[in-house]
Amino acid sequence: MDGAGLSDHERRALSAIEADLEADRSLQRILRSAHTRPRHRTAAACLLGAVTVALLVAASITVSLPLIWGFAAAWTLTVVLALPLFGQWVRRRWQRREHAERP
């Protein structure tokens, strides 16, 4: 390839690859599900966070040992679920900032 464009042979090869990828149903399903998972995780983290706050308030008011242990378990699950989401959010913001600073 001498210039910026593709030769006829390369364009035909690329078209054949794209057609094969578009026809692959399992790949399409995987790509669709990859977009929905973070939303479900975010909703689950928010819901679990609300349950954790409710358990904290209830445990603080009643000083009940089962509520305190329930809060501890819910807090642990909330942190385990939310920490990767927070890391992804920070990474996306960092990448956007780096991309915006480039001339």
Image (tube, rainbow, N blue to C red):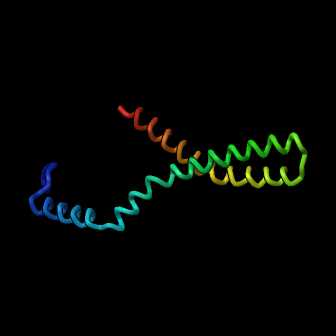
Rendering quarter of residue 6:
bottom left
Could you tell me which residue is drawn at 44 percent across and 57 percent down?
Answer: 34
Q: Position of residue 90 (x, y in %)?
A: 54, 42
Could you tell me which residue is drawn at 87 percent across and 40 percent down?
Answer: 61
Of residues 86 and 57, the one drawn nearer to the viewer in this rendering: 57
Could you tell me which residue is drawn at 74 percent across and 42 percent down?
Answer: 53
Q: Tell me the quadrant of the picture where the N terminus can be found.
A: bottom left
Q: Residue 62 vs residue 2: left or right?
A: right
Q: Residue 70 vs residue 31: left or right?
A: right
Q: Tell me the quadrant of the picture where the C terminus can be found.
A: top left
Could you tell me which residue is drawn at 64 percent across and 47 percent down?
Answer: 47
Q: How many marks?
A: 0
Q: Position of residue 78 (x, y in %)?
A: 68, 50
Relative to residue 31, is residue 92 depicted above or below? above
Relative to residue 85, is residue 12 depicted above or below? below
Q: Position of residue 73 (x, y in %)?
A: 76, 55
Of residues 84 and 30, the one drawn nearer to the viewer in this rendering: 30
Q: Residue 34 vs residue 68: left or right?
A: left
Of residues 67 and 90, the one drawn nearer to the viewer in this rendering: 67
Q: Position of residue 93 (x, y in %)?
A: 50, 39
Q: Residue 93 vs residue 14: left or right?
A: right
